[in-house]
């Protein structure tokens, strides 16, 4: 997985993260925040040079000698940055943290959710965690380590999975996750985008490329039993190299709103 807006990323990526959280900023302000965020020494001249390069690449633009992320660049990357576009199109006030992620396969995406998203983002109040899936993410083939991590997660706080679909594999996966402690239902419509995950006050949005989405949906819609052939196709699908994008934002109000929606779908108040 490549985290293009996270700690340990390149100077350019960190600058985008800084400006996605606060804008507009001068070169000096960006340099100060970059030094604090990265914990690495970088000269003022080097940062200035990087900013100029990002201007040339039209990633950034100047407003009264201060830097902001170019709306044109955001529009070009709209499928990945639509949440950030809303931030820039509305109030200039900061609206929580924003992090962009890239994954190289479905397997890498799934492992990030199990081992990082639920563990790295706090849920000290033990609020319900919710997954909104077009298809219940298949859980056969989980390693022993992944299975134990899921059991730990589901025991710490309530976990709910909601799927729009009712295929054989949706139903099978829902029942399997239920044995691990996650409550799942299938065939329910919901308002969040497909493959949205709610954890504490954080939201993870996932964007599959069209070709992967087509293959993924076709697999679920055609599988009618689980045998060695299906397992082989599944492993091939989740390990195939492809680019998957993710966006994590912090928004307590939206997280609570969708948590409440999930509760109503399960018949809870």
Image (cartoon, rainbow, N blue to C red):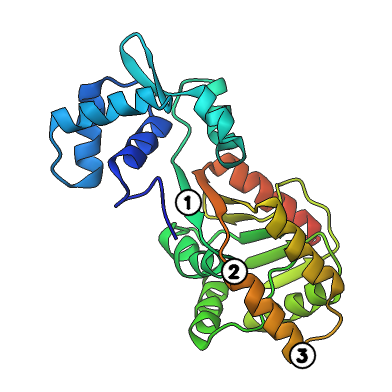
**Where residue 93 appears, x then y in whole percent?**
45, 23
Report how far apart the C-alphas of labels 1 and 2 lie in the structure.
18 Å
Residue 210: in sight, yes or no? yes
**Crowd band around label 3 with a 10 angstrom C-alpha radius: few (<14), some (14–19), many (20+):** few
Residue lying at 83% horizontally and 85% vertically, measured from the top left: 225
Taking depth in this image into account, of 184 and 209 the one nearest to the observer is 209
Taking depth in this image into account, of 206 and 106 the one nearest to the observer is 106
Report how far apart the C-alphas of labels 2 and 3 lie in the structure.
20 Å
Residue lying at 35% horizontally and 28% vertically, measured from the top left: 54
**Where residue 68 appears, x then y in whole percent?**
40, 22
The residue labelled by disc 2 is 240
Labels 2 & 3 near each other (Cβ < 8 A): no
Q: Quadrant of the N terminus?
A: bottom left
Which badge, 2 or 3, is on the more N-terminal residue? 3
Taking depth in this image into account, of 254 and 110 the one nearest to the observer is 110
Residue lying at 55% horizontally and 76% vertically, measured from the top left: 150
For the residue labelled by badge 2, is the local secondary structure a helix, a strand or a loop? loop
Q: Quadrant of the C terminus?
A: bottom right
- Say if 156 sits above or below 27 in the image: below
The residue furthest bottom is: 228
Relative to residue 253, is residue 160 drawn left or right?
right
Report how far apart the C-alphas of labels 1 and 3 lie in the structure.
33 Å
Residue 255 is marked as none
> Can you tell which of label 1 and label 2 is closer to the viewer?
2
> Can you tell which of label 2 and label 3 is closer to the viewer?
2
For the residue labelled by badge 1, is the local secondary structure a helix, a strand or a loop? strand
Labels 1 & 3 near each other (Cβ < 8 A): no
Residue lying at 56% horizontally and 21% vertically, measured from the top left: 89
The residue labelled by disc 1 is 101
């Amino acid at each position: 997985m490549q985290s293009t807006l996270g700690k340990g990323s390149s100077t350019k990526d960190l600058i985008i993260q800084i400006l996605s959280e606060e804008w507009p900023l001068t070169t000096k302000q960006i340099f100060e925040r970059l030094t604090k965020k990265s914990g690495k020494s970088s000269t003022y001249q080097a940062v200035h040079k990087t900013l100029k390069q990002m201007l040339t690449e039209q990633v950034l633009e100047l407003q009264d000698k201060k830097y902001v992320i170019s709306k044109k660049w955001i529009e070009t990357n709209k499928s990945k940055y639509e949440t950030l576009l809303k931030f820039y199109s509305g109030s200039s006030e900061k609206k929580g943290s924003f992090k962009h992620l890239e994954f190289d396969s479905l397997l890498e995406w799934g492992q990030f959710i199990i081992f990082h998203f639920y563990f790295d983002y706090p849920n000290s109040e033990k609020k319900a965690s919710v997954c909104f899936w077009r298809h219940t993410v298949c859980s056969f083939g989980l390693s022993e380590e992944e299975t134990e991590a899921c059991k730990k997660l589901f025991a710490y706080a309530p976990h709910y999975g909601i799927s729009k679909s009712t295929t054989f594999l949706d139903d099978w996966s829902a029942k399997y996750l239920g044995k691990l402690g996650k409550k799942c239902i299938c065939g329910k419509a919901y308002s969040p985008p497909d493959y949205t995950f709610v954890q504490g006050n954080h939201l993870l949005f996932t964007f599959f490329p069209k070709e992967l989405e087509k293959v993924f949906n076709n697999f679920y819609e055609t599988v009618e039993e689980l045998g060695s052939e299906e397992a082989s196709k599944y492993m091939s699908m989740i390990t195939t190299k492809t680019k998957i994008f993710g966006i994590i934002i912090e928004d307590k109000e939206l997280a609570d709103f969708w948590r409440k929606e999930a509760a109503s779908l399960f018949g809870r108040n």
